[in-house]
Amino acid sequence: MPQLIYSPTSPYARKCRILVRELGLSPAITETDANPFGDGDVLLRANPLGRVPCLVMDDGRALTESTLIGAWLNARAANPWLSDWDDRRLEALGHGLLDLAVARRVEMVREEGLLCDYWITRRERAILRALDELEAEAFGQGDRRHRRDYATACKGSRGMLGPGCNFVACSYLSIPLPRHTR
Ligand SMILES: N[C@@H](CCC(=O)N[C@@H](CS)C(=O)NCC(=O)O)C(=O)O
């Protein structure tokens, strides 16, 4: 049976785990919890990159990118989600947003004197630009709704990979950071 190696704190893994459930594939995929920073055998044997998520297929070969895993899961579903070029465009934007959100978090949880304002501010500016664009596309130019409304709109667009990815990115961005960060 295919095995999805994940960590509960990884938003990339969360994307894949949501898809497993939404696509009705839970009975056909086993899930194994592995902290990537523990460098455990199970993960390193499956993925030389040492990252989660990682999906080990029946023949033992592994898929090591969440977008690829998502496409693989979708291809196996009885009722696959829409994934045309426009949806893939939105998914790529959401995936980039997730990369920025994770990079910002990594910067912000460094010890006090190691925080780098340049990188944090650079990530934040890009996150805000991406959210502005996604919101303008969803609601129309000039419609200044609350950020939460965009996450809710994405959640409402079930059945499409792009909004699904953007929903996970928005939820990850709303997680509070530790106290010593700004
Ligand atoms: N591009 C990869 C990113 C995966 C990724 O960076 N996962 C993080 C957890 S959120 C990880 O495993 N980090 C461990 C490391 O970088 O050593 C994907 O989309 O799956």
Image: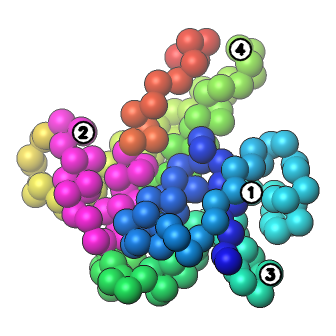
Q: CA distance from mark 3 to mark 4?
A: 43 Å
Q: Closer to the observer: label 1 or label 3?
A: 3
Residue at 13% over, 40% down? 145
Q: Are marks 3 and 4 in contact (CB under 8 Å)?
A: no
Asked if disc 3 is less than 8 Å from ligand 1, the answer is no
Question: Of marks 1 and 3, which one's residue comes earlier in the chain?
Answer: 1
Q: Secondary structure at mark 2?
A: helix
Q: CA distance from mark 2 to mark 3?
A: 42 Å
Left or right: residue 126 compared with residue 130:
right
Asked if disc 1 is less than 8 Å from ligand 1, the answer is yes
The magenta stretch is 146-170
Q: Amino acid at mark 4?
A: Glu
179 part of magenta stretch? no
Q: Amino acid at mark 3?
A: Gly
Residue at 10% over, 57% down? 140
Q: Closer to the observer: label 2 or label 4?
A: 2
Q: Residues within 10 Å of mark 1 (few under 14, many from 20)?
A: many
Left or right: residue 117 compared with residue 97:
right
Asked if disc 4 is less than 8 Å from ligand 1, the answer is no
Q: Secondary structure at mark 3?
A: loop
Q: Which residue is under mark 2?
A: 147
Q: Amino acid at mark 1?
A: Arg
- Image disc number at residue 60: 3
Q: Main secondary structure of the magenta part?
A: helix
Q: Which residue is under mark 1?
A: 51
Q: CA distance from mark 1 to mark 2?
A: 30 Å
Asked whether residue 89 appears in the rendered view, the answer is no
**Where residue 79 sits in the image (x, y, percent)?**
33, 83
Q: Which residue is under mark 4?
A: 112
**Where residue 78 sits in the image (x, y, percent)?**
38, 86
Q: Are marks 2 and 4 in contact (CB under 8 Å)?
A: no
